[in-house]
Every structure is written in structure tokens, then in C-alpha cells.
Amino acid sequence: MLHLNKTKIFILSGAAAIGLAFAAPAALANDFIDISLEDLDFGDEDFLQQLIDMDADDIADMRAEMAEARAEIREAIGEVEAARAEAAANPETKPVVIAALEAASAAVVTATKTVFEEIRTELDDAETDLAAADISAEEMSETKAAIAALREELAGIEDALGELVAAMRA
């Protein structure tokens, strides 16, 4: 089973979920949001072939996995909001919570910016290489659909992470 290694960086988006209480958001993030796409490995030399091999069921599975990741991000947003409310009721902890949220939001922004840029570049490269691929018209169409679906789902993750960062900075 191959995993979307670079998206491990998205784990940082869950930092606020536990980092609030411990003021160590980036270090504790690994146990939270994890986007893992079976059968895809960005950065692999066979990435285009992996995309070509995707069928409608694989695309549906990928969409379901990304929907789960967005749900985890929404849960993290809820935890951020709950921590803010608790901090408002407890002035002694408010500075710690604010510092943890600032650190977590900075980590999410920094890490995901690079990851999204790299993933977009890899999808662009795959699309360019696809034009020269010796495959059937049906495979070409399915692969273009897989790339489009990936772009759409990654945009959804990026939007959800933007909402998480906004909640952290609120």
C-alpha cells in the first residue's frame, strides 16, 4: 500500500486539537489529521502510471478519504473554538492558549503552503506527461478525470485548512 507521503504535513492542521493544553502544537500533531491515499504516492517516478491505473472506484475512494480528512479538520476547528471559549472563562490560561494557537496556525500555514505548491507542480507535470502517454482514449479520459478530482479534493482540503487557520487566529 502506498501513501500520499507529503500530505502527512496536513497533520499539522490538527495541532490545535491537542496542542492547546500543552503549548506544543506542532510536536503533537502527528496523532490527528492524516490524509492517506491508498495507491498514490506523490513524488514517485511512477506517479503518472498510478494516475492512469485509477478507475472510477479508485476516484470515489479518494474522494471519500478526502471527505474524512475535511471532517477531521472541522473537528479540529470545533476544538479550537471550545478552547477559545474555555480560555475566555479562565484568564490565567488565555495567554497559553493564544500562544499555542498562534504557533499552530503559523506551522499549518508554513507547512501546507509548500506541500500544496509541490503537489500542484506534480499534478501539472503528470498532466504534461499524460499528453505524450501511449494510452487509449478511454484511459486518457479517466486519467484526466482522476487529475481533476485530485485537484478539486485538494482545493477542498486547502479551503478547510484555511478555515482552521482563521479559527486559530480569531
Image (tube, rainbow, N blue to C red):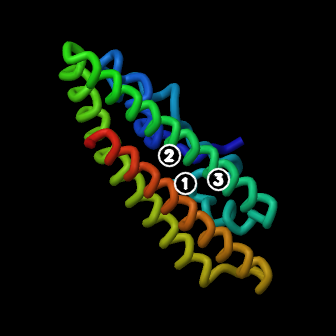
Relative image position of residue 91 (x, y in whole percent): 20, 17
Mark 3 and mark 1 in contact? Answer it, CB < 8 Å.
Answer: yes
Q: Residue at x 58, y 44 (%)?
A: 71
Q: Secondary structure at mark 1?
A: loop
- Work out whether residue 91 can be spotted: yes
Spatial CA distance of label 2 from label 1 is: 9 Å
Q: Secondary structure at mark 3?
A: loop
Q: Residue at x 51, y 30 (%)?
A: 32
Count of numbered circles on the image: 3
* Amino acid at pointer 3: Leu
Left or right: 87 with respect to 35? left
Question: Between residues 112 and 87, which one lies in front from this camera angle?
Answer: 87
Q: Compared to 36, does 142 lie above or below?
A: below
Give the residue number, with chain letter if any, for mark 2: 7
Give the residue number, with chain letter if any, for mark 1: 42
Q: Secondary structure at mark 2?
A: helix
Q: Quadrant of the C terminus?
A: top left
